[in-house]
Image (cartoon, rainbow, N blue to C red):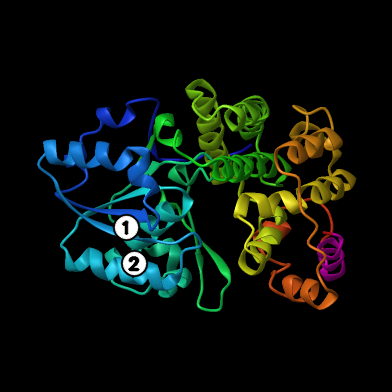
Amino acid sequence: MFTHFNPVDLRFGEGAMKSVDFSLYGKKALIVTGKGGSAKRSGAIGDLTGMLDDQKISYDFFNEAEENPSFDTVDKGATFFRSKGCDFIVGVGGGSPMAVAKAISAAAKMNKKVAELYPIKDKISCYPTIAITTTSGTGSEVTQYAVLTSPEDKKLGLRTNRLYPSLAIVDPKYTLTLPGDITISTGLDALSQLVEGILSKASTPLMDILAVRGIEMIKTSLPAVVREPNDIENRTHVAMASTISGIVISQTGTTIVHALGYPITSHIGIRHGLANMMTICQILKQVEKAAPERVKIATSPFGSVNGTCEFIDSIYPRPKLKLKERDAELFTEEIDLKAGQIMSTPGKYDFEFVKALYMSL
């Protein structure tokens, strides 16, 4: 027996935004984007503001979502949202702007600092949130997660069904302007989520089917778009795989792979998807000892664990970190070994295992 709940209204495909009546969500939007202008370059902002203008809906911009969004950014955004009299929010970009948009919608509605939301996460309410993705990796447009960085520089996931966006728009044409390195890091993030969804103790037969199909799409289409960035057919397949990965982890959660990646991103600066690739092969081998059937399904598109790792190396030759022992200990100390991500991963993961894994990188 398993359950499935994902209430997001998903619009997928070229021109998907044209089907939306934004007046259903409110009268004034706050548009949340990143600092670099990629959302505008993608064409998504022009399409969005054009439609809002046509539908006589006013809007303001909050362009401060950084790559690893902070509590402070969300709090600023919530204050700005209220001061401008907005009544719905649109996150445009990759995982960070969408996470910021979700968190702002809750903090503004509850009139609280984002840090105050964590203890009451299942009791919060939110303003309507629309997620428009311009990358293919996080699947955040269809999840109930917002991963934020605390003042102590720790990544903390705010997870509650209240954070699901009301509407998700996935138009593959918005990914055509992605730089090659972002295409790779986000595509491998999607791969990580698909694999982790299968490995998780919370996996379901339905999510297994979706995840394997998503992995097959990544295997075929990610190398193709790295070679030819303007290949819209393969961009569409990677975008589909990314959205599938979000749907999968909305049901299964992620595993220790994500937990291990956070310190690598925070302290070394390796992007999230690539940080996950640093440890995923070791975790596949560890899970194989406890749940070989899970690993067999997760690696089936590549034939084996080794085949999976060879594919990863063909896309992203993993660098040697050569961590000092004390650094490995500090990284390990940042991980709550009793947290859900670790407990949902088949196998044993104690302090010594995690430290040794970091030392091996």
Q: Which residue is mark 2?
A: 107
Viewer-proximal residue, 326 or 127?
326
Residue 111 located left or right of residue 196: left
**Among all residues in the image, which is located at the extreme left?**
56
From the top left corner, tell me how far across and down residue 286 is, in percent.
86, 50
From the top left corner, tell me how far across and down residue 209 is, in percent.
64, 28
Extent of the magenta region? 350-360
Question: On the image, which quarter does residue 7 sit in?
Answer: top left
Q: Is residue 166 visible?
A: no
For the point 49% across and 59% down, the residue is: 67
**Among all residues in the image, which is located at the extreme top?**
233
155 magenta-colored = no
* Location of the C terminus (image quadrant): bottom right
Residue 308 located left or right of residue 167: right
For the point 50% across and 20% down, the residue is: 233
Q: Which residue is mark 1?
A: 126
Viewer-proximal residue, 337 or 89?
89
